[in-house]
């Protein structure tokens, strides 16, 4: 039997964050990862905003940064105009394109440097309970099953969260419009702009979007995410991406050196993501942004919050739901309002025609970004496309 203060399930950004801050608080901490190589295989567009890093106590490192961008451009279906977001106008949307496997490894290394133990190729096999409290996991490690007991368990095992489900928390997403199917190519020899990440809306990616994340000169991640309810079969999402690339000579001349597929949850924040002795962080708590599909920042910050509540619970020997709900409140206070707003926007955008989408981009592109607000957008729409006001009132 292994005894720890904190057991963390999963060594992605959320798990490494929880492990780092729990260990730094003086708690004996173990982080387990089911894969033999932290960060691999990559399942990510690899875009990373930078505004949150100070709060997460992360220093940018050229080791895992492929490109630092000046801003983002959002194109309507016709691609005639784009909404341009720069650091001055939308700092939280601007940042880096990273090498995700290197980033994840460094986050795990920081946790280890803080004092956490790391076990790779060590999946949790089952939950250990005492009454209604989670007190550890049976872990396959070095060819044997280890009984790992812990005062607190933090699950950072992705949006499907097997561990959360085994413990008794619902983890299945019932609404199919809350799951995005994604395909991405890492391409070389392309004409991407290294200063901007680009996003394309409309029928090129129904109920989703297409993205280009530059990775330096003439290299980029070119990907697409489409709500599964808009797909007839699992191959259709790749066909949409291939068709877009064929229509753009700057990308059709490129060559693919990596092919990535995966699913992303774009649902509301989970209503309940704690049990006595157990906290779910990051994707497991449904903290992926419903509009952007980004989850790294939210995972890392929620891991830090989970470590703080786990520390308090251990210091006070209080593992009740009342204590666990302190973590739920912290997470919801920080993320839930924006999350819900973006979920509503995601639902509404999926219903808009290409023409309406183009008109919306046309209007917002002409608004001075430092003046952007619901009121200024509505005023601009009323002046240029008055017939759109009613259609967009829910979104705005």
Image: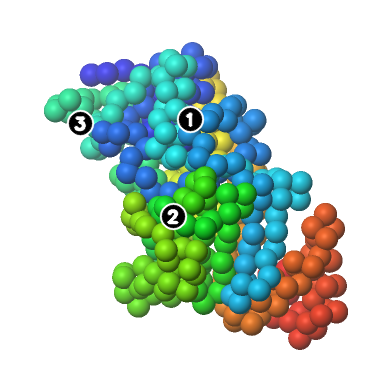
Q: Residue 45, position in %: x, y? A: 46, 51
SS state under label 2: loop
Residue receiving disc 3: 140
Closer to the eye: label 1 or 3: 1
Q: CA distance from mark 2 to mark 1?
A: 22 Å
Residue receiving disc 1: 63
Residue 189: mark: 2
Left or right: 98 with respect to 392?
A: left
SS state under label 1: loop
Q: CA distance from mark 1 to mark 3?
A: 32 Å
Work out which quarter of the rendered image holds the C terminus and state it.
bottom right
Work out which quarter of the rendered image holds the N terminus and state it.
top left
Residue 25: mark: none
SS state under label 3: strand
**Visible in this render: residue 302?**
no
Q: Residue 69, position in %: x, y? A: 62, 46
Q: N-terminal of the two: label 2 or label 3?
A: 3
């Amino acid at each position: 039997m292994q005894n720890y203060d904190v057991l963390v399930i999963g060594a992605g950004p959320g798990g490494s964050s929880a492990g780092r801050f729990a260990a730094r608080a003086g708690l004996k901490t173990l982080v387990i990862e089911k894969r033999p190589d932290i960060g691999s295989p990559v399942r990510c567009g690899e875009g990373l905003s930078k505004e949150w890093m100070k709060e997460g106590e992360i220093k940018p490192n050229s080791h895992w940064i492929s490109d630092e961008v000046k801003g983002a451009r959002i194109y309507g279906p016709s691609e005639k105009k784009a909404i341009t977001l720069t650091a001055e106008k939308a700092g939280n949307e601007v940042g880096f394109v990273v090498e995700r496997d290197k980033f994840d490894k460094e986050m795990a290394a920081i946790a280890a440097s803080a004092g956490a133990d790391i076990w790779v190729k060590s999946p949790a096999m089952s939950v250990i309970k005492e009454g209604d409290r989670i007190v550890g996991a049976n872990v396959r490690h070095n060819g044997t099953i280890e009984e790992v007991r812990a005062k607190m368990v933090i699950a950072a095992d992705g949006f499907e969260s097997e561990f959360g489900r085994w413990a008794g928390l619902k983890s299945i997403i019932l609404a199919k419009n809350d799951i995005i199917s994604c395909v991405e190519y890492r391409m070389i020899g392309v004409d991407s702009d290294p200063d901007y990440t680009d996003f394309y809306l409309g029928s090129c990616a129904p109920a989703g979007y297409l993205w280009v994340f530059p990775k330096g000169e003439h290299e980029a991640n070119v990907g697409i995410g489409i709500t599964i309810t808009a797909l007839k079969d699992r191959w259709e999402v790749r066909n949409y991406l291939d068709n877009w690339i064929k229509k753009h000579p700057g990308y059709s001349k490129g060559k693919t050196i990596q092919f990535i597929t995966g699913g992303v949850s774009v649902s509301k924040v989970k209503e309940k993501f704690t049990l006595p002795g157990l906290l779910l962080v990051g994707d497991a708590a449904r903290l992926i942004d419903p509009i952007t599909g980004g989850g790294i920042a939210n995972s890392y910050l929620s891991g830090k919050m989970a470590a703080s509540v786990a520390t308090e619970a251990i210091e006070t020997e209080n593992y009740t739901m009342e204590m666990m709900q302190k973590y739920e409140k912290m997470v919801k206070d920080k993320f839930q309002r924006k999350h819900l707003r973006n979920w509503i926007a995601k639902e509404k955008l999926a219903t808009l025609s290409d023409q309406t989408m183009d008109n919306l981009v046309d209007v917002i592109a002409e608004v001075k970004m430092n003046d952007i607000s619901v009121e200024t957008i509505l005023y601009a729409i009323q002046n240029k496309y008055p017939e759109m006001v009613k259609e967009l009132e829910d979104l705005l």
